[in-house]
Structure formats: C-alpha cells, structure tokens
Amino acid sequence: MQLHFSPGACSLGIHVMLEDIGAPYELARVDFAKRQNFGPEFLALNPKSRVPTLVRDDGSVLTEYPAIALWLGLSRPRAHLLPEDVEGRVRAMEAVEYLVSTVHMLGFTRIFRSERFAARPEDHDWAKERGREVVRQGFEVIAGTLGDKDWIAGDYSVADPTLFYCAFWAHKRLNMDCPPAITAHYRRMLARPAVTRALAGEGLEA
Ligand SMILES: N[C@@H](CCC(=O)N[C@@H](CS)C(=O)NCC(=O)O)C(=O)O
C-alpha cells in the first residue's frame, strides 16, 4: 500500500491506522505549498486533489477518508479497527462521518481555508469564528459519545485516530480549549506507539 499524505493533514488519521495494522506500506508526500495535489501526476491518481489517497496492493486507488477507514477496518480484521458487532461498527462509522464531514470540513476548513467560505478578506474572521463554533459544538457532541469510556465505540476503532487528527489540530495548531474528555482522549492517543510512529513518519512533534 502507498499512502499519499501531507504532513499533519487529515491523512494523519489514516497513517495511524496503517501503523495500527502493521502491514508494510509506503508514504508518498504531497506538497500542498507546491500545489502538487493539482499537478498532473497526482490528478491522475485522484482527480479530487485531496489526501488521504491510498494506492492498494493491487494498484487500485481508494479516496475519501471514511471509505478508506472502512476498507482498512474490514479488510484487516486481525487489527480490530472495527467492533465485531453491527451496532458497534455503525456507531464507529457514525463518529468517523461526523468528524470528517462536519467537524473537519465545516469547522476546521473554515478556520484554515477561510477564503473558500468568504470571498472578501474582511469576512475571513467571521468565517474563522463560525468554524470555531462548529468545532466546539462537534467536540461537545463527541465528548458526550465518549462519556467516561476510553474509546469512542467502546473498543478502540477507526473512530479514534479520526478524533485524534481533529484534536491534534485543535491542540497543536489552534491552541483551543477542548472539553476534558477530548483532551484526555488526545493524551491516550499520544501514548500509543502507533501514534508516535505516525507523527515521527510525518516529521511532527507530539
Ligand atoms: N472528502 C475528503 C476530504 C479530504 C480533504 O479535504 N483533505 C485535505 C487535507 S486535510 C486536502 O487534501 N486538502 C487539499 C486542498 O484542499 O487543496 C475525504 O474525506 O478524504
């Protein structure tokens, strides 16, 4: 497998899952500053210009974070990245979907890429504040799901590295105050060797 990633992007969550699985994989860095994700080589792989992009061992390409997470969980059952039961599986994917499509795409993206949400520079602060509201609300929802559990779906699952990349952005990039359950989950993730290896592999500090 080959993971196309950008350091510290949402691909970090998939990177952690690959480390959890422990099967061989390669990393292919996509340099956003050089707009490599809009270059012909990358577009031939993923016309959506996005990471994570996963090239599987048969050469086929899988895109969209939730689909990649689901495929990794289903195709590597021995890694236990999805709960055994149907209810546990859909709950794990419910959290993945919410974190990626709402907390990330409608929250963090408003903060990091305000120009995509407000054309006029004078409106960028408004877009960023709205993004922070979405993230705050999203973290409250996920903190409620966590309750006093260690992991979102009961056992550790693909939902946890997904919350991790969001919490990494909140703690390391934005210095945001997060609900205690989110910060405790973030610390639990940082204590996992797979997370240490993924961060090191991207040249990031915990
Ligand atoms: N819907 C995609 C979104 C992924 C996404 O937005 N990735 C960001 C990095 S966190 C990206 O590739 N951004 C490049 C860009 O916006 O130009 C997914 O679920 O994988």
Image: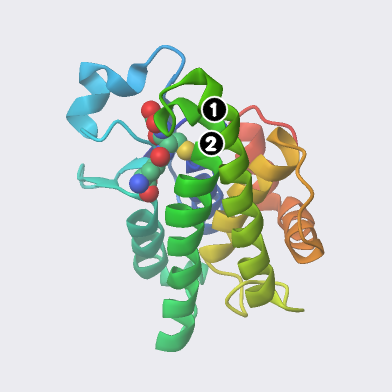
Residue 162: % across, % down = 54, 56
Which kind of residue does numbered mark 2 sit on?
Ala
Q: In the shown orientation, is residue 101 left or right of residue 193?
A: left
Which quadrant does ligand 1 occupy?
A: top left
Q: Quadrant of the N terminus?
A: top left
Going 21% across and 42% down the picture, which residue do you hit? 59
Q: CA distance from mark 1 to mark 2?
A: 5 Å
Q: Which residue is mark 2?
A: 127
Residue 64: % across, % down = 33, 49
Going 51% across and 58% down the picture, which residue do you hit? 99
User: Callout 1: helix, strand or loop?
Assistant: helix
Going 51% across and 45% down the picture, which residue do you hit? 15
Disc 1 CB within 8 Å of nearest ligand 1 atom:
no
**Foreground of the two, 172 or 13:** 172
Q: Which residue is mark 1?
A: 124
Q: Is residue 16 above or below residue 116?
A: below
**Foreground of the two, 202 or 117:** 117
